Amino acid sequence: MSTPKGSVLVVGGGIAGVQAALDLADSGFYVHLVEKSAAIGGSMSQLDKTFPTNDCSACILSPKLVECGRHLNINLLTLSEVLSVDGEEGDFQVRVRQNPRYVDPEKCIACGSCAEKCPKKVPNEFDMGLGKRKAIYLRYPQAVPLKYAIDPDHCIYLKKPGRCGFCEKVCPADAINFKDQPKEHLLNVGSVILALGFKPFDPSGLDFTGYGNLKNVVTSMEFERLLSPSGPCQGHMERPSDHQEPKKIAWLQCVGSRDINRACHGYCSSVCCMYAIKQAVIAREHSSSGAVDATVFYMDMRTHGKGFEAYYDRAREEGIKFHRARVHTVSPAENDNLKVRYAGENGDIREDEFDLVVLSVGLATDPQVIKLANDLGIELDSDSFARTTCLRPVETSRNGVFVCGALAEPKDIPQSVMEASAAALEAERILYPSRWTETKEKHFPKERDVHAEPPRIGVFVCSCGINIAGVVDVQAVTDYAWKLPGVVFAQNNLFTCSQDTINQMAETIKRERLNRVVVASCTPRTHEPLFQETLREAGINKYLFEMANIRDQDSWVHQRQPEAATEKAKDLVRMAVAKVRGDDPLPYNTVPVIKSAMVIGSGVAGLTAALSLADQGFPVTLVERKDRLGGHAHKFFRTWQGQEMQPYLSELVSMVEASDLIDVHLGTTVQDVSGSVGQFTSILTDGTEVKHGVAIVAVGAESFKPREGRWNYLYGKNPNVHTLLELDQRFIKDDPGLKGLNQAVFIHCVGSRVPERPYCSRVCCTHAIDQALHLKEMNPDMDIFMLYRDIRTYGKREHLYQEARAKGIIFIRYDLENLPRVSEENGSMVVKVRDPIIDASVTLHPDLLILASAVRPRDDVGGLSKLFKCAMTGDGFLLEAHMKLRPVDFATDGVYLAGLCHYPKPVEETIAQAKAAASRAGLVLSRDAVPAESITAVVNLQKCTGCAVCARVCAYHAVNMDENSGKAQVDTGLCKGCGACVAGCRSDAITLKNLGNEQIMAAVEAAMEDF
Amino acid sequence: MNDISKSKGAWEPKIIAFLCNWCSYAGADLAGVSRYQYPPSIRIVRVPCSGRVSPNLILDALRSGADGVLVSGCHPGDCHYISGNYYARRRFALLKRFLEFVGVEPDRVNFTWISASEGEQFAQVATEVTERVRKLGPATHLLKEF
Amino acid sequence: MSTVNEKITSEIREKVRELLASGHVAAFLGYTSGSVPMVMQPLIIRTPEDADRLEWNSFCVLNLANYLPALLKSFEPPRRPGDPPPEGPLPKVGVLATGCWSRNMVIQVQENQVDRDRVVVVGISSRGMVDRKKVLAAVGHRDVTAVYEYDHSLKVSGPGYEREINRWDVVRDNCRTCVHPDPVIFDHMIGDLKGERDVADRFRQVEDIEVLAPEDRWSWFSTEIASCIRCYACRNACPLCYCPTCFVDDSRPQWVGKSIDKADTAIFHILRAYHCAGRCTDCGSCESACPMGIKMRILTRKLQKDVLELYGAEAGMDMQSPPPLSTYKMDDPQDFILTESIKGEEK
Amino acid sequence: MKVLILDKAGFQDWLRALAGEFDIIGPAENTKGLLDWNKLEPGELPDFRPGLPKSSIKTFFFPQPETLLEFSARPGDDQAFRPHEPSEGRRARLLAGVRPCDARSVALNSMPYASDPYFLKNRENVAMVGLACTQGCSTCFCTWTGGSPVGSDGMDVMAYPLGDAFALEPVTGRGKDMLLKASSAREAAQEDLAALDALKASAPSSLPDAMDPASVLREKELMSLYNASFWQGLSESCLNCGTCTFLCPTCYCFDIQDETLKGKGRRIRYWDSCMFPLFTLHASGHNPRGEKVKRVRNRFMHKLKYFPDRFGPLSCVGCGRCVRDCPVNIDIRQVMKDLLAI
Amino acid sequence: MFYATLEGLRRFNIQHKFEFVSIISLYAQWIREGRLKVDSSWNREGLKFTVQDPCKLVRQGLGDVVAEDLRFVVKKVAGEENFVDVWPRLSNNYCCGGGGGALQAGFVENRRKYGKLKFDQLAATGADVVITPCHNCHSQVLDICDFYGGRWKTTHLWNWLANALVMDDSATGREG
């Protein structure tokens, strides 16, 4: 192949597409991002909150969108469709049609005058048709790009030229262009990533739900909009019929999922259980009284992700009701209420009345996408999702074309983000020789020297829709800010993080010659970088900035005390103003990057990550605790799709062994780690000192072995009791002893979802069912019983479950109050379990008892997390930087995680995550230098006594005593800005830049000013 | 005086909370994200690490009029900066005992560990500290007056 | 028959004369008497002839370690920032050191204020120093014109009176509860080492206050410091207070107001004491120097007690142990942590 | 001018009568058993025992701190950062039992502060009833400095102990008015006046030999004193604490600082000390008196040379507080002798 | 028989060369094609009709298509305006309560209790005639109507189809 192109086409501007685009653009590739609607953001932008952290969806997404919208190496093509993709891997020719916007994006200032004047009201598709928009519109308030568009299907002028044209008349920027024409772009790219997302299932056909007939039956997506502050009722949860706040709400699960009867969607949509619980939790918060009666009707509760089970537990504790029932009918009741009829597990028929019914609709592929896939020659599966395999989870049937997100299978946001990074990795793997060949470089304007200027502070107070403004009197806060010393400008914004406000902020900084900026909005933990970059773009140093957290730490926590919350907001603004007044411009430090990686753990995750990096030419040190490569995969029979693991593993291992770039250390662990991103030095137990720029932690997990206690079930006592992996090993050996058995019993959730290990192990349901099917393959006459709590065969795995039921495998549900009892009578096993449906005890006599035991974190993960300064969850798994949007990054820069040390997951997700980790690591390795901490310690030599307290307490050896002067000096490359030295210093001689005592005290003292 | 709490006649304490950026501040954010409600008495000052909080800062808060002080960091072992909270623990242990020795009420100055995932705990601690301080009444001992 | 202190004085003179005459030290830091009874004057001598000016008695209350860094520095050639350190060995200086002073010198060495190699320590095992204020109180604050010291008593006289006072009765509080009278570092010893003293209620003064209710403790503290004139004699007498700019002198930020103010004075005393945590050897210089009779030593004593209780550390006992606030243990006590204490209550 | 005789009870009544007009302050035992200036309850007598209170009376004229002005720092206040005079006025104060040396310090401090409105206002506001010394302390040397143990400079009324009673002599017009309230006083009889004269004549002899160092030192060449060799040795034992300067009645150096808190601001003047490192510290970081020896020298040169050169007398009243309370026994009398010897 | 054969073919994936259709769909097809001519004018009294969706035929069998066909035929036969639908309907309709052998196997009380839901549902329509295209449903609906005091007539479909049939040449198949 000749030199591949250095650019990539990403189709679909949802979170997956955006993530793939950012990963690629940040590691040296030019990206064309094609989005069919007028703005990127996809389905995630329509959500109110995200589970399990209840993060405001728009809030966490917005910075990424803005980053994407502003990225120099991302060519955003909205209102665009891919017409054709010709050529092959490394050199594709793509035709893209961009439909006319009829508004010149260069001119539009998003002032909204056009929409105000536009006489044509149109159902707003962003609000799922629940609200109206105009024919000239913004997709949503934080839309990126924040440019209006005219809807040609509804515009009066475009239909009958000369009839209207109000928008053109009122536009102050002369941006309306009725003559706009479709454009066709010819793009030459090396790879294509499809991130086309999903379409919520349309339940109109399911008449029993009443959807379409009964006003107060809404889909979950509609309900998201009803909850959303930017939605049709500004977040004041109202039901459609009478705009009253619903007091009693039902969620009906599996509408359009797990339904082969009416909906023809046999798969599970994976996310609905969690989003329904989330909606129930959020609905309660939204309600004025805080006392919404919320009931979820479900088949199996599928809370199989990280932090999900705890979320479910908490929801139950909070009083949200869960009924295991598939609702039979929703029928009208008085007052536009809804009667819901369902059967209890024991068969009794119950009826309950609700104010509102929410249908938890499933995820499906848009028919237009199906057509596009066909056009592009991308194979779809029977559920119309892109066909991938467990071992190649983001590869489509066409070389060089990759897929991520819900197009391949219904999945949640972190999984989509992970796949997006994995897809980016696959593209990078092909295109790496052309890295940085098509990219442009960003140049900020020269920074104004503000040293000598008196403070000119600008304060931007965010309403965050109603997130803040619903509680805090933002206008009063803005008025107040004007009066603070040094403040020369203050303004209230609906969404300060929206692109137009950001641009306007930059303009304001220039116009008003601001030299300090305060944004009173959400938490700096998510939004500080965005605003700081705005400062740079406006020509001032980004450290002349402070945030007042008046949302997460004010409006959200004092919802019922608007007056006190407003006073607190003023305090917080005053504190920020006081602090920023003393802020100094700081240098932008960088650290040179050692362009090699260390991968810890050589299971499938570690091997995949190592190969993914080596394939791009980056040297890798692979550290394995055991004396052979491969990890637990050696014990693993096959994927749920039936691909056998052992041949695959051998191939992986031999590729690693053959690679010149991978230096394998067996029987070795990491003893000590120092340094930071770009410049790590690790000492291995074999004495090797490794210098590396990044590290990927992929140390896996362990299988819980219930040798004693409550979950023992004769494990270790009877030779015919196995864990899943032990049975796999018998499969691998093709153990003939399995063939003549009469009965096998599987017990699920052994040690998972129990008080001491409250999380769900995610993999066991599918694994167990696949094993049961394999046993059936070996001996179709074998009786197989599955004792389960909830079957969690999420996504396409549901087909396995259907197959198992079809093949006569019997499923008996148990709960923690009625555990199965396993005993030995006359040398044979007896299992007794109560079947809740027939309400009777069932006695089984298995020849084989398989325990689907928990996946548990390894005990030594704690030590590793300390070495790399990474956090752990309460369950003992490693904790990523952000549960939703940074699923493979650690909070510690330059360290990534993959595989089971993060959370239990099947091999396809492990592979995707390993590739994602490699992609993220590539962001660092592809550069010569990465930014380093600017907020570092600094020594005032006149005050320093040389006592060395600072050096003693510095964990990074960043402070040492100068031999000549005897005084402290700081290595800014090593300094992390923790300030342990500052607090230790009695002489106030060492301080943190912009976090000195003076600045902190200014904030403290400002807090106490009672006006 | 437009102080809302005063106009209503009920005294509301003001409490300065020094929270480390990585755990406790994130925990406070999580309390918000999870909508755990707590009294509006806490004024949070974001610091990189509990190890950054010098005793001087705590005294300054009291001198400036804080009715209470809360310092919170990562749980031992969780410090983002490896050991900052261990040093902080020693500094605070001595400071707390010492302040109590000179007659500062034990509930005035509080230290705690709150992780990024402990939103609920943060709300609980904020409520608890507020209640304790409320019982004590306004802080006067180290208050600078003029 | 001469008194113990007279004997010590003559031994000191002899030893110092020898050290100076031999050129082993370039200067010697000791004590001499002056114009006011019971107030001794620290003295630096540079010639063997001056050795006879040295005196030792029970009123040598200020910690001589305090003068040591400046004295050492006076023998260093002047340097501008960036200049390399002087080459070749620098002159040594000699100093008298009791137990607490020597422990202060250990701290000074640990904190890079003193180069041990340049100091010749002449050790004296302390018999306990006399608190002048106790003597004055004993004579009803009358004018004292002469004090003669015997081994176990003092003869105090003034206009129209003469009193003999039992020496131990007027020994300073810190000396009365001192456990380590012997120097921990010395190069020459005057007299013998006495060994550790067995003190029953080492922290009695502190405990008496600890048992009070918070409001009574505050009342004690605020009354104790009420007469403070912010002259900083306590700070300046302390060998630990060597910051070029003390926090009280800082104006950016301003930690405390500089004038007489209830809160500022309290914070000054709290922080001054806190800065000595884990470092204070209870030499009592602060209290001895105070013109207003404030017993601020109890503050540092409290910290000393807590450091010992919590971390098992005593300041300056050896060169190797790290300063207690510059180190930690994973399992340091944390009952004071709110979440832990709530947990504890629940149990 | 009439001399009145008051017994202790009468003295008490008199002070009680004056309490309507003044806050009365006099020497009394503080919580530490030390004699110091304390507010007296109406009718409470000052402690007449020999010896000086711990502190000088300078704090009543040169308070620690003096609020020079106040300002608002509240956001939105249109008067913000515009200074105005301190709002609070103080009641007139009467110092009862002032020793002649202390009273003389007020006269001396009035020289540099001749046009300082704060000092002058305080002077106006403070009346003094003096108490002649009948017995000196080992640290007293007022006569060296131009003072006298029975001097009445600066007083409004001078009291002389005569046995169990006091002879009261008005010194100023205000003193005369004050004495009008001494209802139980009797006019001094002849023998009282004789005893008073005897007391006045005998008192100075109980002190060390009188000298007039001011006139001698005024004549000496400044640099020869400045370059004297003894400063180094003298300063070596000095702790550079501010005890001497803060106890000294004639140390009048000050520093000024703005304090702001809770939206209120004030500019205060407070005692500085030439012993302190911040003294004469320049904004550049340079300090012409950066070393201890220079600071120590400054203190004595100021009192004993610069001040007399400018105003005539020494800036020292010989109260001996610095000698009494210096932790390292630095004795200004010796310094004076050393300077005189040059 | 109908359902068992259908499900057998599906479950065991038995290859077969025939199509599996309900007579109802054929009626509907023929009516649409004009091959079967029906006229509702016979219903001068305006008898109201409703239907039962048998589980084996609809929900588990051939799905909603056949249920829609059933309604189509009934409307043609009885008049559009004379059809009253039940709620819930089609696949989501209630079971009659007589299946699974309940009609033959004793437990009469239980069976009638299950049937109460069906009775209430049908009674709520106010229909005069309930069409039950399943013999099992027919017997159960007949029984619960009687037992609970319903007023409707329970019948199969063909009775009424016969009533409405327009007998002309094309229908009789005679050549013109």
Image: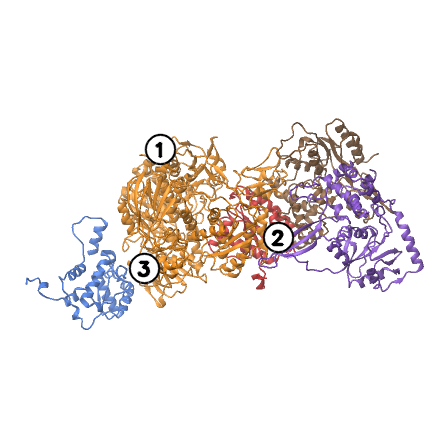
Chain colours: A orange, B red, C brown, D purple, E blue
- Distance (Cα) linking label 3 and label 1: 63 Å
**Residue type marked 3:** Tyr
Q: Where residue A871 appears, x then y in whole percent?
A: 48, 44
- Distance (Cα) linking label 2 and label 1: 64 Å
What residue did someone put label 1 on?
Answer: A655
Q: Is C54 located above or below residue A311 in the figure?
A: above
Q: Quadrant of residue D128?
A: bottom right
Q: Chain of mark 1?
A: A
Q: Residue at x 45, y 34 (%)?
A: A594
SS assignment at label 2: helix
Q: Chain of mark 3?
A: A
Mark 2 or mark 1, whichever is nearer to me: 2
Q: Mark 2 vs mark 3: same chain?
A: no
Q: Is A506 left or right of A270, judged from the image as shown?
A: right
What residue did someone put label 3 on?
Answer: A157
Q: Which numbered marker is on residue C43?
A: none
Q: Is B132 left or right of A750, judged from the image as shown?
A: right
